Image (spheres, coloured by chain):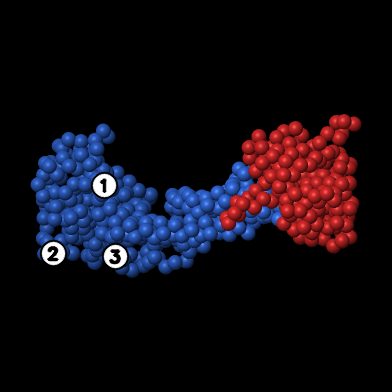
Amino acid sequence: MMAEERAVVEVEACTKSFDAGAGVVTAVDDVSLELVRGELVALVGPSGSGKSTLLSLVGALLAPTAGTVRFEGTDLTDLDDRQRTALRATRVGLVFQTAALVPFLTAAENVALVGGFAGMATGAARSRAEQLLTELELGARKDHRPGQLSGGEQQRVAIARAMLNEPRLLLADEPTAHLDRQRGSQVIELVAQAVHEHRCAGLVVTHDERIASQADRILRIEDGRLVDG
Amino acid sequence: MLLFLTLTLAGLADALDRGSTGVLRSLDADVVVFNEEARLQLLRSRVPRPMMLGAAFVDGVGQVGTLALVPTSAETPNGRVRVTLVGFSATTPAEPTTLVEGRLPVDGEPGIAAVDVALRAHGVRLGDRLVLAGEREVEVVGFVEDSTFLQQPTVWVPPDVWARVQVSAFPEAGFAEQLVGAAVIRTRPSADPGEVAAAIEAEFDGVRAVPLQEAVSAIPGVDVQRRTFTVLVAMSVAVLALVVGLLFALLVTERRSRWATLRALGAPRQLLVATLLVQGVVLWMLALLGGSIGTALLSRVVPDAMPLDLRLPVVGLVGVASLVATVVGSSVALRRVARTDPAAAMSEGVR
């Protein structure tokens, strides 16, 4: 049980600043949080509050200016670019605002693509991709290209892609931004289902409180700081 | 389209160059000796026969032959054709090495000639009789290839036939038995042609001896032609690099979010760079193939007066130059892809 609840990601007093020409902008300011297995956390905040920057720090896309981000005990600041890339490929699943699928690949090929980044054999990646698409009720659409799929279906393909390498952490950056309420709700449901069934940690960024209510826990961020909610 | 243009220019340059220089390139020789006043022009050269005989005793000289040219005409089955008559001494370095059919005439065969394969287009076949300069008849006993001179087909005859045609073409010059055109020398295997040429010039007054390649470059128009076409081909390759650079810059800008997404998903930088590089190489291969086919087709439809020929070495040379241009042109885009920030895949896009 202890192992089950052990944090996948621990963020401690993390700050991220950017040089914006005229001055330094602090996008994330002294944030601490933990993400544990089997729990979906929603990160809510207005536009420009630092949600995506925090998500990027947690997902090894950015290095913090100060503080530490530990991923399963490994301090991400100790990793170089190649190691962070490898970590993302093998242990992080990402869902973006838009599905961001490669337009000339089929749904199954899009999902299997990331298997190659993680060193998975082509055949194994392909069969795992088809299995995930079937689980997400897209089995019949596996050979369709993104242009032949609806927005909701494309996001489901993106979720399957994020789950291909059985990640320890699933990150979703405003995955419902371009979907209507019903489809957005379905997508969050699928993300939550993936987190619960695959026992990974999950963090979903959204500015929609009603979507956030489907998560297990809600964190609010304003001006780069987590606030009580 | 740019590669088609480049290949067409290169093919044209190559065909023009070969059409002008074949007569010298077809020889297995290393040094050519002219009289000084000839200024390295084969048509003007008249060296004294004793000099030619004496050259055989210069250090490094292996074998000496004579080569003499005169422009004239030949009556062919399809009409009169302008040709260059080449008087050559048989079994010497002045003998063409590009015989493709029949045989070459030997000294003492005044009514026999070997002709360039270009005359086949004028209906000339083995055994045909050609009338040279409207009066001297020769029988065609052989065909040589790639031996044209200043875009004209050549007719290879023994030196005395050349001497008589020369007299009828330029009666004011008179018949000078002690003069030959140019001396053509094959050096000994260990000798340096440049040093042998210098030794000949030191030994004989009033002559100019140069390595064969220099004599080839001295053929009228060849040097200017080579420089002009080199500049044109280089410019088109430079434009190719520029266009490839712009195309890839556009491609990278347009797909920036895709590169960022793939980086975020764990694609290594090298994989993205390699992917773009492969795209560039595939594009280059398709362009080279299309350009080659287009140029080859064009060479079939252009009039005979426009020498355009696409040989494999030319395709290879243009291919290598254009590949380098492609890599250079795409290098800026490749650097941008390599530096793609995976965090740019996120919605807020801070930075």
Seen at 75% across and 32% down, the residue is A73
Disc nearer the start of the sequence (3/1):
3
Seen at 89% across and 42% down, the residue is A197
The residue sitting at the front extreme is A228
Q: The chain drawn blue is chain what?
A: B
In the rendered structure, find residue A80 and report the number of the disc placed on it.
Answer: none
Visible in this render: residue B338? Answer: yes
Question: Residue B41 appears in which quarter of the rendering?
Answer: bottom left
Q: Which residue in the structure is indicated by mark 2?
A: B171
User: Is disc 3 surrounded by few (<14), some (14 to 19) or many (20+) residues within 10 Å?
Assistant: some
Q: The chain drawn red is chain what?
A: A
Please indicate whether residue A39 sits to the left or right of residue B341 in the image: right
Q: Which residue in the structure is indicated by mark 1?
A: B212
Specify the amino acid type for callout 2: Pro
Seen at 74% across and 47% down, the residue is A55
From mark 2 to mark 1, how far is it between C-alphas?
30 Å
Q: Secondary structure at mark 2?
A: helix
Q: Are the residues flagged by discs 2 and 1 in contact, CB closer than 8 Å?
A: no
Locate residue B292, reporting x and y percent.
Answer: 50, 57
Q: Secondary structure at mark 3?
A: strand
Q: Which residue in the structure is indicated by mark 3?
A: B82
